[in-house]
């Protein structure tokens, strides 16, 4: 979704947003990065793409990530974070969530936090996921699953701010 040019694009319904594993926030490039972008994309050089992974490779890596164990405390943190984003329910949500959130993350968020933590652990050369991995993937996993209400918007609260408070 392009936040500037809205013609022909529409925000997705909450049920469809939840199906995306991560929402990666990408800001503007640094001046040095932008210079490199310009130099590499405005010349006559022809780029030839080379396949680096097959479909089987991707499926194999997905299976490998699922086989990585996660500590009980990591799974508990993933579930607790997801549940704390829900303004109604079993009372797990802090007052600031009840004040600012109209719709919290569902069970898919707990799954994504756990799988993201497992992937981060293995990419970091570790054979098991821990709480630090869950914390590291919390913002990209939760930011599009937590829908803030008008009061939060009026107070300038962003999803990342809310997630940061939950993590602290």
Image: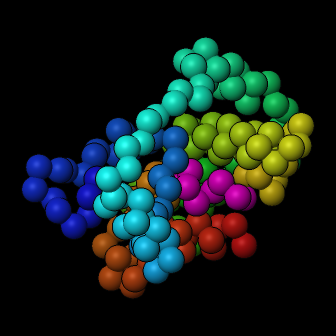
Looking at the picture, how far across and down is residue 77, in whole percent?
75, 51
Residue farthest to the left?
Answer: 7
Left or right side of 4 for 117: right
Residue at (55% x, 55% y) in the render: 140
User: What residue is drawn where x is 31% and y is 73%?
Assistant: 150
In the depicted view, which residue is nearer to us: 55 or 101? Answer: 55
Q: Is residue 161 left or right of residue 157?
A: right
Q: Is 52 or 124 nearer to us in this picture?
A: 52
Q: Position of residue 111 (x, y in %)?
A: 63, 37
Percent across and percent down for residue 20 are: 45, 40
Q: Is residue 134 magenta?
A: no
Magenta stretch: dominant SS? helix
Is 115 positioned to the left or the right of 150 in the image?
A: right
Residue 92 location (% of width, % of height): 64, 57
Query: Which quadrant holds residue 16?
Result: top left
Q: Is residue 131 above or below residue 67?
A: below
Q: Residue at x 43, y 72 (%)?
A: 34
Does the image show residue 73? Answer: yes
Q: In the picture, residue 94 is in which quadrant?
A: bottom right
Position of 92 relative to 73 (above/below): below
Residue 140 covered by magenta stretch: yes
The single residue placed furthest to the bottom in the displayed view is 155
Decide which of 60, 40 is in the foreground and name it.
Answer: 40
Task: Tell me, yes or no, if residue 114 can be seen here.
Answer: no
- Closer to the camera in the image, 132 or 83: 132
Q: Which residues are magenta?
A: 135-142
């Amino acid at each position: 979704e392009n936040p500037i040019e809205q013609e022909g694009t529409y925000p997705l319904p909450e049920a469809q947003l939840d199906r995306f594993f991560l929402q990666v926030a990408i800001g503007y490039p640094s001046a040095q990065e932008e210079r490199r972008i310009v130099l590499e994309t405005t010349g006559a050089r022809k780029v030839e793409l080379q396949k680096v992974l097959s479909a089987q490779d991707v499926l194999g890596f997905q299976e490998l990530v699922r086989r990585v164990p996660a500590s009980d405390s990591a799974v508990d943190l993933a579930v607790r974070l997801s549940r704390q984003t829900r303004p109604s329910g079993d009372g797990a949500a802090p007052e600031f969530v009840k004040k600012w959130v109209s719709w919290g993350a569902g069970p898919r968020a707990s799954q994504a936090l756990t799988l993201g933590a497992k992937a981060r652990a293995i990419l970091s050369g570790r054979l098991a996921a821990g709480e630090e991995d869950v914390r590291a993937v919390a913002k990209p996993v939760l930011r599009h699953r937590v829908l803030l209400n008008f009061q939060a918007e009026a107070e300038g609260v962003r999803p990342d701010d809310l997630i940061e408070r939950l993590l602290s």
